[in-house]
Amino acid sequence: MSSSLGTRLSPPPGAGWFAHRPVAGLAADLRAGRLTPRDLVETALAELARWEPVINAFVTVDEAGARAAADQAGRELAAGVDRGPLHGVPVAVKDVIDVRGLPTTAGSRQFAGHVAAADADCVRRLRTAGAIVLGKTATHEIAFGPTGDRAANGPARNPYDPDRMTGGSSSGSAAAVAAGVVPLALGTDTGGSVRIPAACCGIVGLKPTHGALSTHGVLPLAPSLDTVGPLARTAADARLLWTIMSGTEHRGTTPRAAWLPPDTIHPTAPDVTATVREHLRGLDEVVVPQAEALRTAYVAIQGSEAYAVHAERLTDRPDRFGDEVRDRLRAGGEVRGWEYVRARELRDRVRGEVLDLLREHGILALPTTPLPAPPIDDRTSDVGDVRAALLSLTSPWSVLGLPALSVPAGLAGELPVGLQLVGPPGSEHDLLTIAEHL
Amino acid sequence: MSSSLGTRLSPPPGAGWFAHRPVAGLAADLRAGRLTPRDLVETALAELARWEPVINAFVTVDEAGARAAADQAGRELAAGVDRGPLHGVPVAVKDVIDVRGLPTTAGSRQFAGHVAAADADCVRRLRTAGAIVLGKTATHEIAFGPTGDRAANGPARNPYDPDRMTGGSSSGSAAAVAAGVVPLALGTDTGGSVRIPAACCGIVGLKPTHGALSTHGVLPLAPSLDTVGPLARTAADARLLWTIMSGTEHRGTTPRAAWLPPDTIHPTAPDVTATVREHLRGLDEVVVPQAEALRTAYVAIQGSEAYAVHAERLTDRPDRFGDEVRDRLRAGGEVRGWEYVRARELRDRVRGEVLDLLREHGILALPTTPLPAPPIDDRTSDVGDVRAALLSLTSPWSVLGLPALSVPAGLAGELPVGLQLVGPPGSEHDLLTIAEHL
């Protein structure tokens, strides 16, 4: 293995203050009195004001709430009450996750005017750890889309090139972290919605083991696949957030890894493969022959479950969905019950085989997406249909409920490329460790 | 409670030798040398020859295999090898359950010529306990039907009135036990397929907790609902078979029971309700408001899973299904994935509510079916569509995975009526105890 991934990807030109500071450094500065939580919030608000016209990453900014929480956090720290490494650190929350008193719009006119009565479990946990919610970030409409360019509030834009997609559906969370507006953000990942925008925006995104974190207070998309996951600039920052979200600890092991050639799953741009493979020289190769079938199973499971969530909205107020999401929801509603049953049987059958393979070969490494961020609104590409391509390398692991991490691997042309690491259930810290060692 | 159920229903006129002997008595006679296993097999074969032209209960009779097994069992007993209370006792096995070396036809031309290479797990367990497989009993085609009158080998016929249905799908097992051809039989129950024919033929049938017994070696119909269950003439005989099948023991408790008015679920013939209620005077009444929704969920779950099992047969050789089963399979194939998802969500949600209700009120008691055995081929009745009616009072508990027992409650006109007892997971012995005390 080369160690060039250790040299982090350069932030996008003009990236904000947080793009240059590890969260651990912020924590040290806060405790040394060099900074206050209010300083961090004001900095985040200033960077947001500068970047928001470019990236369209926020749906709601809670200036007053963030300032009040920062002042409270500052008083606690001054009084010697220390809630840990997130105490006083601003975070952004994807707009499908409830934050008490703020709208949850899910990027859709269906939810206009919906104000959350309580914090989602994951938000409550972050607040208990002292984190400060700066606002709600853009999402592909109802979190149903890997491009991030269909939402009631318009497309989110990539900080590396605002004419390009952020990837989705956690579009705003990825863009805001990449642009250095906030150091950390929460997203959700059903088939790749944390990992894809993390890859497209050159940051780190973790999709946890299905069921590892509560999704209470999160708008469901497909409950048997849905997860909540952290987005951060570095693996170290992501571990910090994951440790607090999950209540787990790093055990210090460094597992083996094997290279999964992405073209065995979906045609992949050669410069993407080369950029990722560069970090993984010398690894054994391994193929997951069922990945193609898992992609098909993903479509049946996700489509059926998403329609079950939104059926009444489709019947009662179809006009409140954007055209593309409405059409895709309706297509999901046409999946037959027996196809859903077979998809779940496939999931159960293949899961054991892939767990055997992980035991034998270690963590799987492959690109996160087979192409870098496409231009906004593009739906075809050199590697085929854009939406299918973006999901192709991430959705198989979602079907299996496995944790997967996307970390920046470098640039292809001038656009970030993501390396994806996939492990057995509960291996989140191991994935982060491999990312740190690359 | 009156104790009139203690007086067992009279067997049908001309019922065979086994209709008058408890299995415990056979076991005593075998050990006292008053009978040999070979005597029991010859008696069963003689009764079978007499009754089969009337009831059409068997698809395959293994005369040679049964005689050889009987002789072996006799030698063991003579040598002091005692396998327990089923040692040397003949049993019949529904023809969706594999018995090594015998055809498993499932009552369908789809499976003509299919010979089982191994015993199903439940058969292996009975053989280990010394039971002797006499043959394979008729089933509604692929176990998909509550009437028992659609099968490649023609309709099974009710021993109380051969112009009437046996109920299904375990039609032959129920008819053979009721007619006294065998003392015990195995059936399968997905939505009522053990309980319905038990009720229609005036015997005892137990649908166990879903997952309590292995279904390995059994043709699936709808795996998330399928169970294997015993049919017997009395609760004591059923307990004996259940104890051996499950490896569980009777703990001697006698739980409370409450009356569930069947008309709150489906219109029920007044004489059926009166006949069953007679045994349950003084019980509190309780209503399960979600039972109607569970019936609908049953149709979605069963239809989707059954189509998933048989899709290729429907595509490749649709002509090998009977018209009615083929049409019903195809209807199941039209259920949408999102409807299946919602049915399973309903299952999960209601299950907790019904478990709370069982904790508060005890075992639920209601009729097994809302009408006695209809005439063969009838599809309409005073209480509505015959198939929907027959399944209406049994399928809700299948959706919830709960154990349920049907015991004879008396006659309505000249036809048997069943009382159904429903309990929490693992309460099979409690259900049998209540039945013995009624």
Image (tube, coloured by chain):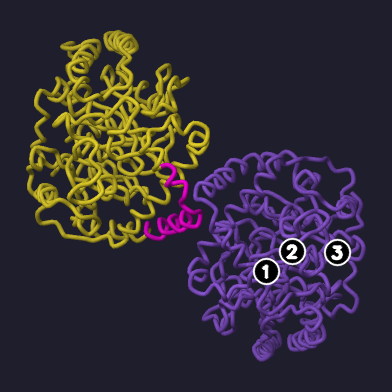
Chain colours: A purple, B yellow
Quadrant assignment, res A384: bottom right
Callout 1–callout 3 Cβ contact below 8 Å: no
Q: Name the dominant secondary structure of the magenta segment.
A: helix
Chain under callout 1: A
Q: Which residue is mark 2?
A: A205
Q: Position of residue B195 (x, y in %)?
A: 26, 40
Q: Which residue is mark 1?
A: A187
Quadrant assignment, res A191: bottom right
Q: Position of residue B359 (x, y in %)?
A: 29, 57
Range drawn in magenta: B329-351
The residue carrying pointer 2 sits among few (fewer than 14), some (14 to 19) or many (20 or more) residues within 10 Å by Cα, namely many
Badge 2 or badge 1: first in the primary sequence: 1
Q: In the image, what residue occupies the spot 90% across and 69% down?
A: A10
For the question of whether residue A57 can be seen, the reply is: yes
Q: Nearer the viewer, residue B34 or A202?
A: A202
**Mark 1–mark 3 distance (CA, rounded to whole Å):** 19 Å
Element type at marker 3? strand
Quarter of the image with the C terminus of chain B is: top left
Task: Say above or below: A124 vs B65.
Answer: below
Q: In the image, what residue occupies the spot 64% across and 68% down?
A: A143
Callout 3–callout 2 Cβ contact below 8 Å: no
Badge 3 or badge 2: first in the primary sequence: 2
The residue carrying pointer 3 sits among few (fewer than 14), some (14 to 19) or many (20 or more) residues within 10 Å by Cα, namely many
Q: Nearer the viewer, residue A167 or B404?
A: A167
- The three-letter amino acid code for the residue at tag 3 is Pro
Element type at marker 1? strand
> In the image, are marks 1 and 3 on the same chain?
yes
For the question of whether residue B27 can be seen, the reply is: no
- The three-letter amino acid code for the residue at tag 2 is Gly
Q: Which residue is mark 3?
A: A416
